[in-house]
Image: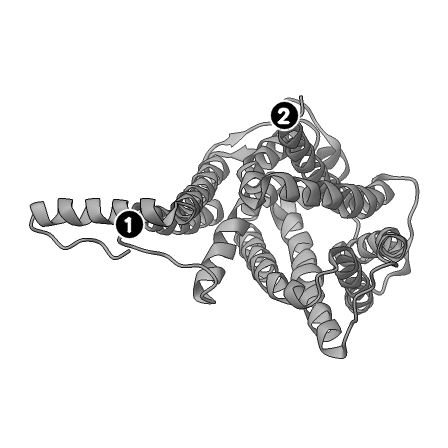
Amino acid sequence: MSSKKPFLVALLIHALSAGMILLSKAAFNGGMNTFVFVFYRQVTGALLLAPLAIILERKSPKPLSLAIFSKIFLLALLGITFALNIYGVALVYTSASLGSATINCIPVITFAFAVLLRMEKVNVRMMPGIVKLVGIALCMAGGVILAFYEGPGLKPPFQGYSHVHDSSNKDHNASSHKNWVLGCFLLFVSTVCWALWLVLQAKVLKNYPSKLSFTTLQCLSSAVQSFFVAILMERDPSQWKLGFNVRLLAIVYCGVIVNGVAYYLQAWVLAEKGPVFLAAMTPANLVMTILGSVFFLAEVVNLGSIIGAILLVISLYCVLWGKSKEQSMDDLPVGAKSESTVDVKVAAESNGTDPPAP
């Protein structure tokens, strides 16, 4: 059972993430303003994380300089405030299944940024490097198919929440090809923001390693930023009122379950199995979201979305496979590496070709 525990916890994490997407989409279909939703979500998360950070890290406080805080504030603006608000608008224009499919792009785009910033290397003369480049190409192809090809649709077996409460909004937005393309573009922008956010976080964490305080400061910063964005974009007081409905459920779920429970479980899995293991389980999020969007939100899943999602999943595994192979080669003993290099050189000389660069 202990060997299966990381696998089961990783599945739980992606199930919670799928629930976040489905509940967010249901709240938006119910008429909730996306900018107000992001503000309430971040406030809820900050109220949960702040006491935990004070209690758990009070014995080992890390000095926080103005420069570090400024970087954390800008990170929150890029990867939380900006990304979540764009993602929310994109969900209104598209679907929950498409929103989940684009999450598979994040590890691939993160790797591309890491290459551009010289945090990762790609050896195009070795198979792992070639496969990683293929993964990036497939990610781009999948995104194009998602945006511009719809194909026949898979009709839901029964009417769900979104169909009953917001059929006019669905007909106006989701069925409009122009809005669909715009939504796909916004999803791409949000994933780029998340990917760049992940890369930049690694650099800031080297100077401020208190992970819980780091997350809490980002959440608090984003709550303040999201408030001003929401005030600017939504002036109707009725949009700020909460009742015992799907809006309140979505806010509490995202703020407590996702920002609290899921983030903690994610940190545990990363410590036990590493980032590659957790990223490899990302397609489970897509499968759960597609099933939930069809059966509970009554969304129509088009053939183009399925093909594009499959390409995104393949691109993810291409990058993960290439990365794992390169790591296994780096972990070889020095003697084994030299022996393998000699073997390659001998084989190359016997074939009259030049050996590949080490």
Q: Nearer the viewer, mark 1 or mark 2?
A: 1
**Residue 205 percent location from the top left of the image:** 66, 63
Q: Which residue lies most toward the front here?
A: 335
Q: Which amino acid lies under the numbered mark 1 shown in the image of this protein? A: Ser
Viewer-closest of 192 and 159 = 192
- Vertical relation: 358 (above or below) 328: below
The circle drawn on residue 249 is: none
Q: How many marks?
A: 2
Viewer-closest of 316 and 228 = 316
> Which of the image's four quarters has the C terminus?
bottom left
**Residue 110 percent location from the top left of the image:** 52, 56
- Vertical relation: 244 (above or below) 89: above
The circle drawn on residue 4 is: 2
Q: Which residue has dot 1 on it?
A: 338
- Vertical relation: 253 (above or below) 62: above
Residue 223 seen anywhere in this rendered image of the structure: yes
